Amino acid sequence: MTGVERRRTELAVRLQAVRERIAAACAAVGRDPAAVTLVAVTKTWPVQDVRLLAELGVRDLGESRDQEAAPKARACADLDLRWHFVGQLQRNKAPSVAGYAAVVHSVDRPQLVAALSRAIALGVARRGGSLTCLVQVRLDPGVGRGGAPPEAVPDLADRLAGAEGLVLGGVMGVAPLGGDPAAAFRRLAEVAERVRERHPQARILSAGMSADLEAALAAGATHVRVGTALLGNRPARR
Ligand SMILES: *Cc1c(COP(=O)(O)O)cnc(C)c1O
C-alpha cells in the first residue's frame, strides 16, 4: 500500500466511526442523523486529506485561519465543496473569507457584519452569491475562545438578517474548556431558540467537536465540527 492508500483507509475507518457516533447520539434522543451536517475541520492537515475526505463523500469542510484556508480552497476549486470558516475572524480578512466560504460560523461583533456585507457587495462572493453567517455565542464565563456574550446575540442576529448579501443561518458555540458541555450546549440551545422566535429561518445550531458531539446532538445541534476524531491529533502549528 502506498502512503496515500494507507491514509485513505485510515480516514475511511475514522469517518465511519464518527458517523456511527452521530447515528447513536441521534438515536438516543430520537433524532434523524440525516438532518445533521458533519463539518470536517481540516485545519493543519494537507490538501490531500481534503481530497480523500471528498472522495469518501464529505462535502462540508471547516477551517479556522484564512492564511491556511484560502490556498486550500483554491487548490480544491475543482471539487464541489462547502467551506465553513469556524475560527476567530479579523475584519481585514473578511473579503478573502467571503471569496470561498459558504458559511461563516464566527460572527461575534457588528464590525464583522459590516465587513462581510461590504465584501459581498464588492462581488467577492463564491458561487451562490450570498454568505450564510452564524452568530458565535460565548459560552465561557470568562473571556477567551471568542464569541459574543448571550445578551449581545439578538442585536447581532438582527444586523445579520438585515445585511445585504448575508443570510442569518443561526448560532454557533464552543463548550468551555473543563466545563460541563451538556450544560453549555443547553444554554446555547436557549439562545438559538430566542433567535428563532424573531428569525424562524435561522435553524442552524453549530455545536459539538470531537470530544463533545454527543452532548451537542442531545441539545439539538444541526452541525457538528469534527477535526481530531476524523483526521487524528493535529501536528503542532508551525
Ligand atoms: C479545531 C476546531 C474544531 C474541531 O475540534 P476537534 O476537537 O479537533 O474536533 C471545531 N470547532 C472549532 C471552532 C475549531 O477551531
Image (cartoon, rainbow, N blue to C red):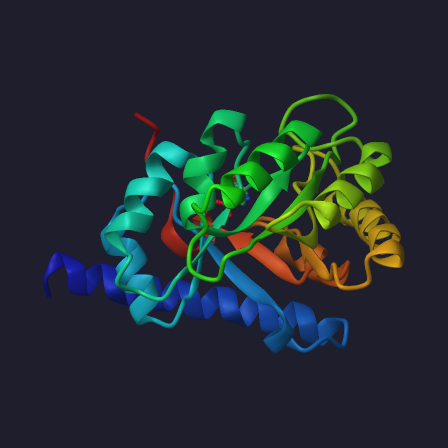
Residue 163 position within the rendered picture, expressed as x and y whole percent measured from the top left: 68, 45
Residue shown at 65%/23% (left/top)? 144
> In the displayed structure, would residue 56 be above or below residue 162?
below
- Residue that sits furthest to the front in the current view: 122
Residue shown at 47%/41% (left/top)? 122
Viewer-nearest residue: 146 or 161: 161
- State which quadrant residue 22 falls in: bottom right
> In the displayed structure, would residue 40 be above or below residue 35?
above
Viewer-nearest residue: 204 or 158: 158
> In the displayed structure, would residue 84 be above or below residue 13?
above
Viewer-nearest residue: 45 or 107: 107
- State which quadrant residue 176 falls in: top right
Residue shown at 59%/50% (left/top)? 165
Residue 216 position within the rendered picture, expressed as x and y whole percent measured from the top left: 70, 55
Viewer-nearest residue: 233 or 133: 133
Mark yes or no: residue 63 visible.
no
> In the displayed structure, would residue 115 be above or below residue 232?
above
Q: Is residue 227 left or right of residue 207?
A: left
Mark yes or no: residue 108 visible.
yes
Q: Is residue 2 left or right of residue 165?
A: left
Q: Quadrant of the C terminus?
A: top left
Residue 94 position within the rendered picture, expressed as x and y whole percent measured from the top left: 49, 35
Residue 13 position within the rendered picture, expressed as x and y whole percent measured from the top left: 36, 67
- State which quadrant residue 114 falls in: top right
Q: Quadrant of the N terminus?
A: bottom left
- Residue that sits furthest to the top in the current view: 143
- Residue that sits furthest to the left in the current view: 2
Q: Is residue 221 left or right of residue 69?
A: right
